[in-house]
Amino acid sequence: MGDLDARQAAVTEKRQWVRLTRACNNHCLFCHDVGAHDGQVVPDDEVLARLQAGRADGASRAILSGGEPTIHPRFLDLVGAARDMGYTWIQCVSNGRMFAYDTFATRAMENGLNEATLSMHGHTAELFERLVGIPGSFRQSLRGLTNLLRLGAVVSVDVVLNRQNLPHLREILQFYIALGVMEFDLLHLVPFGRGFDEHRDTLFEDPVAVARELSRALSLVDEVPGLFLWTNRMPIELLEGHENLFQDPHKIYDEVLGERTAFKELFADGTDPECLGERCPWCFLRPFCDAARAAAAAGGAGPPGGGEATAATEADRAFCAAARGWTDAELRAAAANGLRMPLREDYREAVAAMPDRGDLQAMRARLDAPIDDLPPCLGGPLPGAVCFGALPFRTPDAPAGRPLTADDLPAFVSDFIRTGYRVKSLRCRACRHDGTCPGLHVHLARHWGLRALTPEN
C-alpha cells in the first residue's frame, strides 16, 4: 500500500473516540481541553454505552482519551471491555506516565491494548517539564514509552508545536526515532484553553517561523525509511514543500459535528460562535467559520444536492477533453458556457478528475476567458471577480429558500470541502490580488503543491 493509500485508509477507518476522564495528572501550558476538566472520571456506564454505540455504528477502532485516560480507576477493565465488544484495534491517547509501572503496562497489553499515542513535547527534562508543568514527568513518561515498546505495542508520539519547542523539533523527532518510534502527530497550537488565555505571548509563534522549523524537521521523511508523520489542525500554508503531509480535510467533520456546538447553534438560530474575535487569526477553522457565518447570514438556502453529481461529471469530461487538445473553435465554444475546474470532496477522486497541469497551462494560453475555480496566477477569475464555486447553499445571487437548520450542517461541510475550501501560500501575502483572490482549492494545492502559486507584485 502506498503512502497516499495508507493515509486515506486511516482517514476513512471507522473509529469511536471515548472520553474516560475530565482530569489530568499533567499541567500543560498549552492544554486546550482545560475548560472541560472538572477533576472527575466518566462513570463506567457512560463509557460502556459509548463503546457499545460505536460498535453498533460499525466502528472497529476504539480510542480511549481524556483528560488522561489511564488515571481512570477502571482503565484496564475498560480496555478489556472494548476488546470483548469486538473492537479489533484499541488505542489510547496518554501522557504515558502510568505505563512507567511495569505491571500496569503489562496488564494493559494483556487486556487488549494495541496502540498508545503518547504526548512527548520535548526531548530533554528541562524542556519537557517546563511545558507539562510536573517535575519528574519526563523520566516517568519516557519509562512508560520504553515499556510499551518493549511489550510490543504500537507507539506513536504527539508533539504540540509552540514557540518553545519549535526550534528543537527536528532534534525531538530524532530523539524518539532513536528509541524506536516511527510515527508522529504534529499538533498545531489552537487558540483555546490555557495556552491562549494564559501563555499566548510565550507559546504562539509567527507563521513564517513555524513554517521554517517545520520544513527543517519534515525533511526527515526523506531521510528515514519508514517514518510516518501526520499533521493535526495544521494550516496547509505552513507545509509548503510538504503538502502531502496535510491533514485530510475530512477532519472538519470531526471538529464541526463532534462535541463542538457552536456551528450547530449558528445554523439553528444564527448565533455567532462565542469565540469570535481575537482568536480568529490563529484558528485553523477560520475559513470554514467564515463560510458558515456567511451562509447563516444570507437568510435562506436551497435544498442540498439535487442532481449536481451527474452535471459535474459531464462538465468534468468536457473540461478534461478541452485540456487534452480540443481545437480552438471547440475550446471557444466550451469557454462561452464557462469553464470550471473539476472539484471533488474526496482527494483521490479529485486527483483522478483534474487535468494534467501541463495540459491546463497549454489550454489557458489559448483562452481569452478565465477558468473558474482557479486563482488569477493560474488563469482564474480576474481581480475582483471572486469565484467560490457553485455551492448549493446561499450563493450571494441565489434566491432565498428555506432557512438553514442544524440538520443542514453535514451537507454544508461536504459542500465546503468539495468547492469552498481554498488555501494560499504564505508568499501570497505579498500578491497584489491577495484581497480578492480566494486561493487554490485544497486538493489542487495538495496535488500540485503551493509552489504552483506565483504572487503578482
Image: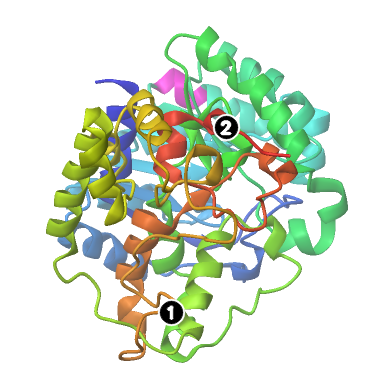
Question: Rounded to the nearest whole Å, what is the CA distance between mark 2 and mark 1?
Answer: 41 Å
Magenta stretch holds residue 149: yes
Which residue is label 2 attached to? 100
Tell me the amino acid under the disc marked 2.
Ala
Q: Position of residue 455 (x, y in %)?
A: 65, 37
Q: Quadrant of residue 389?
A: bottom left
In the image, residue 452 lies in the stretch drawn in magenta:
no
Dot 2 surroundings within 10 Å: few (below 14), some, or many (20 or more)? Answer: some
Q: How far across and down, in percent of the image, does residue 84 sit?
A: 19, 49
Q: In the image, what residue type sits under mark 1? A: Lys
Q: Which region is colored magenta?
A: 147-151
Is 9 left, or right, of 300 in this rendering?
left
Q: How did the renderer colour the structure?
A: rainbow
Q: Is 350 situated above or below 252?
A: above
Residue carrying label 1? 264
User: Quadrant of the image for the N terminus?
Assistant: top left
> Compared to 250, does 37 lie above or below?
below
Counting from the top left corner in percent of width and height, residue 59 is at: 22, 52
Image position of 149 (left or right of 177): left
Instruction: Please tell me whether mark 1 sits on a helix, a strand or a loop.
Output: helix
